[in-house]
């Protein structure tokens, strides 16, 4: 029987992985760095979140970029103690861009709000030891474009503040998001075009998200290989945006693609972000946490990923 198109692509990635395994087996010894994006935990105290991640065997957290105003958000001098008590380090910060702080907005006040937000969030990322800050070119939760000039406004606005990333040694990671949630930058190819148009050393990396990729890319594994060295973080959830193992995501092929990229190295992260289905996940950041459900969500996701990783690498 002739293989389906996605099966042909899967086979090519498997071949790349098998070649790596035969020619450079030491390249498979280190496992992928796992992290968790905590903004989906809602209003839970950070110490409680850190305790949960420690119990699940995680060493990294992607912090909620919650500095929406000068008097809001995490205090950088408090973070090392809270996380250090549980052996957790900061991988990066999840930048949050809504219609209120939209790099592409046709209202100058909202673009200025995005600039001011980055002026708070980039130094914070450096202060807590994060290596990247996720940046979304247009508001999440607004799928309809304002006009045909969004791309130009977004790149112009970000370019004007991009030196900040270089100054603080933080990687701006552009995240492609599905077209149901935002009006710009839906694929890895779109992210690369955006980065090329911006043309600044401070903005040169990509934050992938397998949930968005399954909607917008023809094949997730191929898209990861296309991102290549630019990929610095990959958000992970199952096909239904729930705990890993509860959907139909082809986790094994993604793992093979990541190892083929040499992604199992320092400064590269697989970050769980199971937010549940829906068009606008931002309300989750203000949700009342259910500790028992969150415990199961984290433990099940991490356990399933490590099981699949060992199966792929050791077979």
Image (cartoon, helix red, strand yellow):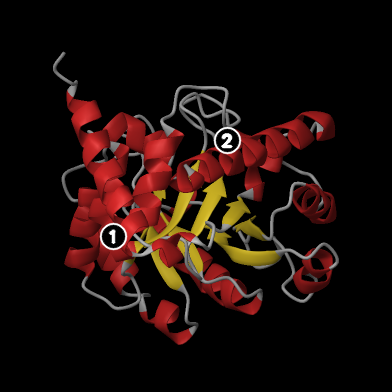
> Element at badge 2?
loop
Quick one: quadrant of the N terminus? top left
Residue 202 in which image quadrant: bottom left
Residue drawn at the location 64% of the way across and 47% of the way down: 39
- Mark 1, residue position: 228
**How crowded is the residue under tag 1: few (<14 C-alpha within 10 Å), some, or many (20+)?**
some
Taking the image as shown, residue 64 lies to the left or right of residue 232, namely right
User: Nearer the viewer's eye, disc 2 or disc 1?
Assistant: 1
Residue that protrudes farthest toward the top in the picture: 1
Taking the image as shown, residue 84 lies to the left or right of residue 213, namely right
Residue 274 — which label? 2
Taking the image as shown, residue 296 lies to the left or right of residue 67, namely right
Residue 207 in which image quadrant: bottom left
Residue drawn at the location 21% of the way across and 41% of the way down: 12
Which of 126/71 is in front? 126
Q: Do the residues under discs 2 and 1 have CB atoms within 8 angstroms?
A: no
Label 2 and label 1: CA atoms lie apart by: 24 Å
Residue 81 in which image quadrant: bottom right
- Residue 94, can we see it? yes
Indicate the position of residue 200 as horizontal and vertical percent values. 26, 76
Indicate the position of residue 134 as horizontal and vertical percent values. 46, 58
69 above or below 216?
A: below
Indicate the position of residue 309 as horizontal and vertical percent values. 52, 44
**How crowded is the residue under tag 2: few (<14 C-alpha within 10 Å), some, or many (20+)?**
many
Which of 173/311 is in front? 311
Indicate the position of residue 61 as horizontal and vertical percent values. 65, 57
Residue drawn at the location 37% of the way across and 38% of the way down: 253
């Amino acid at each position: 029987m002739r293989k389906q198109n996605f099966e042909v692509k899967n086979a090519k990635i498997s071949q790349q992985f098998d070649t790596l395994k035969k020619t450079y087996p030491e390249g498979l010894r280190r496992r992928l760095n796992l992290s968790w994006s905590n903004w989906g935990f809602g209003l839970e105290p950070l110490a409680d979140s850190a305790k949960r991640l420690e119990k699940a065997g995680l060493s990294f957290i992607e912090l909620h970029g919650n500095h929406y105003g000068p008097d809001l958000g995490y205090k950088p001098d408090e973070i090392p103690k809270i996380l250090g008590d549980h052996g957790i380090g900061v991988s990066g910060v999840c930048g949050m861009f809504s219609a209120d702080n939209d790099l592409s907005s046709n209202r100058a006040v909202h673009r200025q709000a995005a600039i001011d937000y980055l002026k708070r969030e980039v130094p914070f990322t450096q202060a807590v030891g994060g290596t990247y800050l996720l940046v979304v070119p247009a508001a999440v939760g607004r799928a309809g474009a304002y006009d045909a000039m969004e791309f130009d406004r977004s790149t112009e606005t970000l370019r004007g503040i991009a030196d900040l990333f270089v100054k603080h040694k933080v990687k701006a990671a552009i995240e492609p998001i599905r077209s149901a949630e935002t009006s710009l930058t839906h694929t890895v190819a779109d992210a690369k075009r955006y980065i090329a148009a911006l043309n600044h050393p401070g903005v040169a990396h990509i934050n992938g998200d397998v949930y968005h990729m399954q909607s917008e890319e023809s094949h997730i594994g191929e898209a990861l290989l296309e991102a290549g060295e630019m990929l610095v973080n990959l958000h992970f959830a199952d096909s239904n945006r729930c705990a890993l193992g509860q959907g139909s995501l082809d986790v094994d092929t993604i793992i093979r693609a990541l190892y083929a990229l040499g992604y199992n190295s320092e400064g590269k992260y697989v970050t769980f972000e199971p937010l549940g289905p829906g068009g606008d996940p931002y309300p989750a950041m203000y949700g009342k946490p259910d500790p028992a459900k969150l415990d199961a969500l984290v433990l099940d996701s991490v356990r399933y990923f490590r099981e699949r990783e060992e199966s792929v690498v050791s077979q």
